[in-house]
Amino acid sequence: MATCWQGLWAYRSYLIVVLMPVLLLPLPILVPTKEAYCAYAIILMALYWCTEALPLAVTALFPIILYPMMGIMDASEVSIEYLRDTNILFFGGLLMAIAVEHWNLHKRIALQVLLIVGVRPALLMLGFMLVTAFLSMWISNTASSAMMVPIAHAVLEELYSVPRGKDIEEGSENPTFELQESGSQKEETTLDNGQVHPVPPAPSEPRAKQNQEQVRFTQGLSLCVCYAASIGGIATLTGTAPNLVLQGQMNTLFPENPNVVNFVSWFSFAFPTMVILLVLAWLWLQILFLGFNFRKNFGIGSQEGEKEQAAYRVIQREHRLLGPMTFAEKAVTVLFLTLVILWFTREPGFFLGWGNLAFSNEHGESMVSDGTVAIFIGIVLFIVPSKIPGLTQDPREPGRLKAPPAILDWKTVHEKLPWNVVFLLGGGYALAKGSEQSGLSQWLGNKLTPLQNVPPPAIAFILCLLVATFTECTSNVATNTLFLPILASMAQAICVHPLYVMIPCTLATSLAFMLPVATPPNAIVFSFGGLKVTDMARAGFLLNIIGVLVITLAINSWSFPIFSLYTFPSWAHSNTTASCRVSPENITTPTP
């Protein structure tokens, strides 16, 4: 019997793939409507995404098959959703990220910041968090974590290694990295042979206690990297895929919206949110793993010891190994800054951007999108040489001049580009479009009208908690893809600005702090060892609560002028929102 159950468990993915469509068949058979057909497709995809019985990107392709067969959408209409402007923005942003990684520019930035902040415990944690968060704003959080964790462990090895030429007991105390202790300070004296002995009558602290303190700081430094990677991604539109899911679904569900979610508006809202959450996360991890003695944590009043100098030399050595900035790094830096400047000045809203002035339509709106800018800079990366052009001969063919390779080539892009996310985003947009065209969104809106009596801030807070819990077990992109169409319908039903509930949901999908499987940065840190699931869950639980509170603060304060959340927008009206007018009943108030 046990063998039979083991066999079933081994083939659970196959059983889920085969049985789920059959078990859900009564829904479209008993209720032969387009709404039921679309619900069947969405529920099936949700179950496959949650169980990961199939790869996420493969499940995202289901609308191409199911929607035409069920009469929901034509195949040509479904296919268009897989290469929308938001996908182009994602692709173009990744080209720049790949160039930054390929030429090690991100490592140079990281090491330079660490040289500035130093190796004091609290400042070292802050330095790693600042660097990781900044890099995650522009490159994938997986890549930033994979680069920063080995650097962190190299520094920790120097901090806790045995100094050469001295017979000091392993695990001996480090004055700077001595963590919070209870009771009186212990006194030590060094004999001629270099051995450390306690001075009576104060007893020496057990070695196990010192090793435990080292382990705790190692755990804290590891967690600060993965948490900062997830937090940093929320600051920019291209920082993490759920942000692009929001922009794409806004344009799909509300095609008449005046591009309300763009690079500038999102950065203006999300960057302060990210900074507050990052600082609070740093303080929480410092208290949890270093203790409450902030003078000791910041190294105030203590001399820099030999191990701190050794750790600092590790960072210096790694920085020297990079050598001076190459022409390729300088070119990538210039193009990166150009991309950011073009994004910020294309259509900022508070003044006419270059997109409004040079490439406007009859309404004065920019015909150039953020995706256009990203692709333009991406193409330039394939043109600009990686070395200063000169009369260099090909060593294989003497006498023939050889042109330097470009900054980016297609082989590198093909190897490093996460194509699965492109399809996953497209599947989400197709799912949202089918929900709208089948009438499922309208049906959901009618069922959710009783929520109109609940204060909008309470709704936003509860949704944040729900999504933050859900995203611990499922992909953040899949979570956002499933929730946003439902939330958009709910907002229309209760006459609340759609972004008031969609933005908190999007940010909450990045609050995956409790489990190693919740997000790739967590898994990378966990794979290096030194952490148990309980350690991550204990640190991540309160950080999830802090994140929800910060998001609630942000959506009820500075988001209002940025996204005009004061009233229900005209572009969100539908057949179910005919009664929504600019009145006190449907004005979203920023306070409960």
Image (spheres, helix red, strand yellow):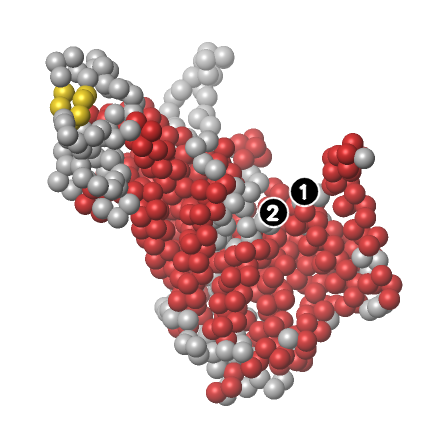
Look at mark 1 in the image and give the residue it sits on. Answer: 55
Determine which quarter of the picture holds residue 297.
top left
Q: Nearer the viewer, residue 72 or 558?
A: 558
Residue 223 appears left or right of 301: right
- Which residue sits at x=46%, y=28%? 405
Q: Nearer the viewer, residue 495 or 408?
A: 495
Does 373 appear above or below 554? Answer: above
Look at mark 2 in the image and give the residue it sits on. Answer: 422
Residue 203 appears left or right of 334: left
Label 1 SS: loop
Which percent across, then down, holds residue 280? Answer: 34, 54
Bin the neighbour count of mark 2 within 10 Å (Cα to Cα): few under 14, some 14-19, many 20 and up.
many
- Which residue sits at x=63%, y=65%? 485
Which percent across, then down, holds residue 104? Answer: 40, 32
Quarter containing the N terminus: top right
Which percent across, then down, holds residue 103? Answer: 41, 32
